[in-house]
Amino acid sequence: MKQRLEIPLILRRVRVDGPDALREIGMILDTGAMYTAISWDIVKDIGYDPAVALDRVPIITANGVIEVPKIKVIEIGFKELYVEDVEVICHDIPEIAEIEGLLGLSFLKYFKICLDFKTNILEIL
């Protein structure tokens, strides 16, 4: 049986689990982002050091192309949705109150989704 879970496009309590800590952070759903992005401070708080990450990927920003660290976090979860070993990039999001990351395709690809722009709701089916 399918379960329908409606979630807003701005998520206030996304759980990010690392080797040292579990944090709840605010994130924005970004269906156009290949990777989930988490700020450097959060990544460091949960037990990773992005400065020494061996894997780096290029991303396009307003200031041009830059290379950012890519790591795997133990788990990312929101409500009943959990994904283990999620690839994330370490990149600070421009200052938006209580937002410390973007929830991108490296998380969303594990679900069947329907995005309703009229209501700003993403349905997980």
Image (cartoon, grey):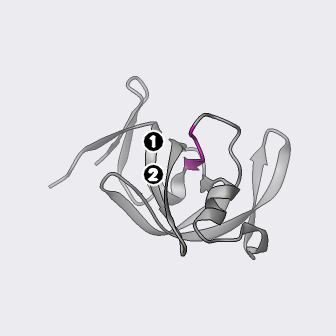
Between residue 54 and residue 12, name the one nearer to us. Answer: 12
Q: Position of residue 36 (x, y in %)?
A: 57, 55
User: Residue 9 in the image: x percent, y percent?
Assistant: 46, 36
Our reading of the magenta stretch's main secondary structure is loop
Question: Which label belongs to residue 70?
Answer: none
Picture residue at 72% right of the left edge, 73% below the top: 55
Q: Amino acid at mark 1?
A: Leu
Provide residue 33's location: percent of width, then percent of height: 60, 48
Assign the N terminus to one quadrant of the image.
bottom left
Under mark 2, the amino acid is Val
Number of marks: 2
Other residues around mark 1 within 10 Å, as few (<14) / some (14–19) / many (≥20): some
**Image point 41% across, 60% down: which residue?**
110
11 relative position to 36: left or right: left
Can the viewer see residue 83 in this picture? yes
- Is mark 1 in CB contact (under 8 Å) with mark 2? yes
Vertical comparison of 99 with 47: above or below: above
Residue 35 visible to the viewer: no
Q: CA distance from mark 1 to mark 2?
A: 7 Å
Q: Residue at x 45, y 51 (%)?
A: 14
Q: Residue 45: give x, y in percent of width and height.
A: 61, 63
Say if the magenta span includes residue 57.
no
What residue is shown with label 2? 14
Q: Residue furthest left?
A: 1
| Mark 2: secondary structure | strand
Mark 2 neighbour density, 10 Å: few (under 14) some (14–19) many (20 or more):
many
- Is residue 62 or residue 32 the one in the foreground? 62
Q: Which residues are magenta?
A: 98-102
Residue 32 position by quadrant: top right
